[in-house]
Image (spheres, grey):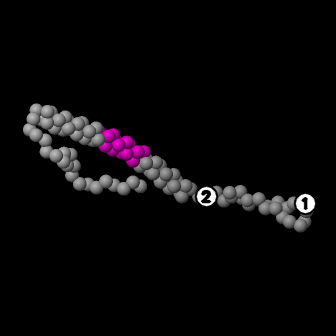
């Protein structure tokens, strides 16, 4: 099983050097914000898809568990047929052969 990532809040990425207040810096900041927004939207969509796949698999597993429990109850309620033991002796007197059905 993979380790779970920590559940700390998502902080915006920051630059180590503050930029001068220019039009280019404003557009760069705008670009970074749009990029981060797009990335987070894609991540959220992927998480939703994964959640849907997991939920569908859980529904299948629930149905299979219910079917198996029903089969187990039916097999428990019916008396098991005793398997007949058939013994046959070979022509040689030195040993006997025994056939078991199971």
Q: In this picture, is 74 found above or below 56?
A: below
Query: Quarter holding the C terminus?
Result: bottom right
Is the stretch drawn in magenta largely helix, strand or loop?
Answer: helix
Q: Is residue 27 magenta?
A: no
Does residue 76 appear left or right of residue 63 in this picture? right
Q: In this picture, is 73 found above or below 33?
A: below
Does residue 36 appear left or right of residue 46 in this picture? left
Q: Residue at x 59, y 58 (%)?
A: 79
Residue 100: where, in percent of width, then height? 73, 59
Q: Is any atom of residue 3 visible in this view?
A: yes
Does residue 80 appear left or right of residue 55 in this picture? right
Farthest left residue in view: 21
**Quadrant position of residue 94:** bottom right
**Quadrant position of residue 54:** top left
Residue 67: where, in percent of width, then height? 47, 49
Q: Residue at x 87, y 60 (%)?
A: 90
Under circle 2, the secondary element is: loop
Q: In this picture, is 93 found above or below 67?
A: below
- Residue stretch rendered in magenta on the structure: 45-60
Q: Is residue 54 magenta?
A: yes
Query: Badge 2, how many Cα within 10 Å: few under 14, some, many 20+?
Result: few
Nearer to us in this view, 57 or 15: 15
Nearer to us in this view, 74 or 93: 93
Q: In this picture, is 7 found above or below 28?
A: below
Residue topped by disc 2: 80
Q: Earlier in the sequence, mark 1 or mark 2?
A: 2
Q: Residue at x 27, y 41 (%)?
A: 44
Residue 28: where, in percent of width, then height? 17, 35
Residue topped by disc 1: 91
């Amino acid at each position: 099983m993979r380790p779970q990532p920590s559940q700390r809040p998502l902080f915006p990425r920051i630059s180590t050097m503050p930029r001068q207040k220019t039009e280019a810096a404003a557009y760069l900041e705008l670009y970074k914000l749009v990029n981060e927004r797009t990335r987070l939207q894609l991540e959220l969509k992927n998480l939703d898809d994964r959640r849907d796949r997991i939920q569908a698999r859980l529904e299948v597993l629930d149905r299979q568990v219910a079917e198996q429990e029903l089969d187990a109850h039916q097999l428990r309620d019916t008396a098991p047929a005793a398997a007949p033991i058939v013994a046959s002796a070979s022509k040689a007197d030195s040993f006997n052969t025994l056939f078991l059905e199971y």
